[in-house]
Image (cartoon, rainbow, N blue to C red):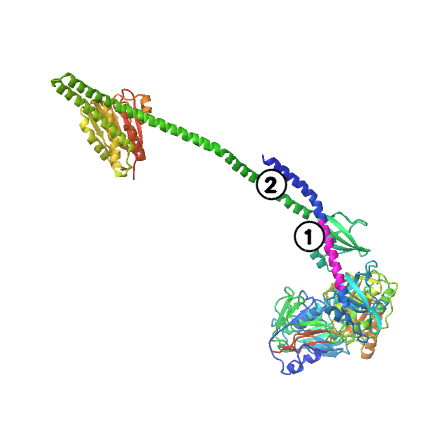
Amino acid sequence: VAIPPILLLAGLVLVLLARSFERTAAARLDSGVEAVEGSLARMEDAARARLAALAPEDDGGDLRGFAAAHGRRLELTVLEVVDADGVVLSSLHWPAGFGLREQDRVFPDAPRFRVEKAAEGYGAADRLAVVAQRTAPLAGREVVIRGGSFVEPARLEELARLTGTAVALRDEPAGRWIAGEGSPLARWSGPPAGETTGEASLGGERFHWRARRLAEGLSLVVAVPRAAIAEVMGGVGRATVIASAIALVAALLAASLLSSRIAAPVVEELEDSRERVLQAERVAAWREMARRLAHELKNPIFPIQLSIETLRRVADDDPSGRRLAEAFRESSVTILDELRALRKIVDEFSQFARMPAPRPAPVGVNDVVEQALALYRPRAAGVDLRTELAEGLPPVVADRDLLARALGNLIGNALDALGGAGRLTLRTGAAGGEVRVDVADTGPGLAAEQRTRLFTPYYTTKRGGTGLGLAIVQGIVSDHGGRVEVESAPGAGTTFTIFLPATG
Amino acid sequence: MRASAAAAVAAAVLGGTLARGAFGPRYGGEARVVVRGLPSTFAPGSGRGAATRLVGTLVHERLVEVAGGVAHPSLAAALEEGASGREWTIRLRAGALFHDGAPVTGADVVRSLRRFLRSRSAAAARLGDLLDGGAAYRAAGSGALPGVLADGDTVVLRLRAASALAPAALAAPEAAITGGRGAGAGPFVPTTPGPINGQARFVAFSRHVRGRPFLDAVAVDEAGAAPRPALSPSAEAGPLAATLLLVLEGRGKPAARPEDRRRLAAAMDGTDLVRLFIPRGGPSSLVPPVLLPPVAAPPPAPARGIAGALPLAVSTDVPPAVSQRVVALLTAAGLQVSVGARAPDEVWEAPAAARLVLFTPAVADPLLALDELAALAPGADTPAARALRDRAAVEADPGRRAVLVARAEAELRATAVLVPLAAVPVGFRGLRGMHGAAIDAGGRIRLEDAWLEP
């Protein structure tokens, strides 16, 4: 959802950038023009101030060394003394001109600018200077003292660098540029007459340019490469795209956070609902357990009640007491049997409720089998009891007593199923890193529906069974990292197998 | 031991004082000389500039040297005139050796003179004209040269006409005597076949014919190398051994017509030039005042009606301030001057309508100097000037010969192709604590007797 507005925003920014491009070019040109004009103005001010500070002394006629001496002191690069006829009487920058008429070029409408003849190498060069001048009496005559500084291409280059432009002065009569080395303007034929701004191709690159007239035949030209501005704009554009991308990511994160906030109550509701279901299941389980408990308790209680009522009736109906003794004997047997059944029920529930935590230690499974079997041998009368214990089994880490109890439960179930006839085989073995114990009987076997519910607590197929025996077995084996499997079919007997992880 | 020094020195004032020098010469040390335009090789006469000539005096020996208008024996022990002036016998110094240890023999002299005669040297051309069979040999570039004969350590020059000029021609740099493998016999031995990266170094030749130089070594560097104490050319010290010449080649405007050239020449105020820009300079003829009396410059006349562009090649041994003044004068005359600086070895061949050169003759003899100028600026030469020089070359009487030379100079100057502006002192300065260095009449620095204070 956030993408379209962001893309729209980015597009809008790019359009604005294009407009800003033109404004930026204009601003740069303005800054370049202002920088150069300001620099030229400062040069003129400095020339005027230094010339005013010049206090020439009349040395009696020989002025030749005058300019050199005072020019260096005043840090001027242009200083010349000429007479009324324009004959050079002294020159700092063109000593070769001594006694000759000056060969400078002037700009009548802007006397601060002059093209001065200046010494250079083995000859002379015409150099643009910004000057001020004054008259003074020297050597018995009125002379003109002119001083200032040359417009140094290096200075223009520096201004160009500071303003991010190309800067040059165009000396039209000489058809030349005054510009720093490498200035693209130096290769240009110059701005078209009468035009003050435009675009030009310089050295294969497009430039915006602006010209400012300084004097008749002398112009300041400032140019900005389109590529430079485009680069800046490109940078802004890239920044916009990046910002958009960041905004998009932020929007996605915000949406994610928001949706999680919105969904939280629903999730809580679902969790509450799940908790309520579990609670209901727990209640149902407790109800089932209560039902089972009531049922199991009712079974022995009813015979006990019946036996006691029989004793009271016999006692009332037989004052001689002859039948009472017989009835007492029979009833007491019944009552004791049912009390034993009650005791067993209580013991099993107690075992299930208070299963102790295993205390594991390496044990031999064959030993545990022998230990469990020893308890049930007295009950195995009539049963063909066999053991097939594999030798060299790896030990398992287990609580010997708990494991013996689990095996005892299986053995007891099997003996119950055999009903005093048939075969019970206890078999041990090892495979795949596990130790297995089979408890196989040749009893009636189990139907498929019975097998599926076999380990459900309180489920039993035995009369008087609590349905907790196999649940206890599964709990013990599970606590030891093992599992219990059962193979059975009606008429084919039943085999329970305990798998435990072997050590070593 | 160092007898030749007195003959060679015309004027030499380098760093140090007489008081310091009074302790006497000592062996050791290295002198460094900064020059412009080192030659590409150290072969004899491989250029015209001061650097080439300096290297020539370090590495090579010639049979004679010219000073005061007279040829003096150098590698030769003696010069003897015979056959009424048509034969000159040259006896070599005993024990003279080349740098490779080989002795200097008459055969080496003959081979060296044949090489000299094949060169473009004006002195070689003059000697070729004088030698028996010399002109034919020069024309062919090989073959018989009956005018030069060798017998052991004696060499005989046979001339077709009597001339006192022949020995002087042997003082040309190109006439240096070299061994069969190109070795020189000068006081210093180059450590490399030529300059490397603008630097050359020479070590003292302990078996030099006049004895081992005092200095251990001389380093010659192109100007622009890292500054350290060194000798450097100076136009403010030394003898007036050079002439500042404006050469208007006559090719292209505005120097094509003689009348324009003369007007330009008249506008060149040599007097002011010397007064303002050449300390210790003076007026000059076409050749330096040490060879011919100077010619007084006429009052300058403003040049009018001259206009146009004038490409000017300036030799880099011309002091820049002097060149700037000349350019200012030419500009004031109405010309648009474009200046190109050239090494002294190149300036005469540079494509330009005008040249500003510092002319130091290869041989300090006025007639040979005029020959040299005529060869350098053929446009200045005329049949009349040539005839006068030829007559002077065979004129036995010194007085009449001097007159002929003066007339030849005037004849050359009349074309206004060669415009003498000033006589310029040639010297070196710097390197405090150096003694014994000298500038000879030919404007060459001589370090053979130089020594450094410890």
Q: Horizontally, is A140 left or right of B154 in the view?
A: right
B371 is within the stretch colored magenta: no
Determine whether, in the image, residue B414 is placed left or right of residue A385. right
Decide whether the magenta segment is chiefly helix, strand or loop. helix
How far apart are the two marked residues, 1 and 2, measured between alpha carbons? Answer: 29 Å
Question: Hey, what amino acid is under mark 2?
Answer: Ser
Residue at mark 1 shares a chain with residue at mark 2: yes
Quadrant where the N terminus of chain B sits is bottom right
Q: Nearer the viewer, residue A501 or B136?
A: A501
Mark closest to the chain's N terminus, 1 or 2: 1
Residue where numbered disc 2 is placed = A244
Residue in view at x 61 percent, y 44 percent: A239
- Residue A268 appearing in the image: yes
Pointer 2 indicates a residue of which chain? A
| Residue B275 percent coordinates (x, y) | 79, 74
The residue tagged 1 is: A164
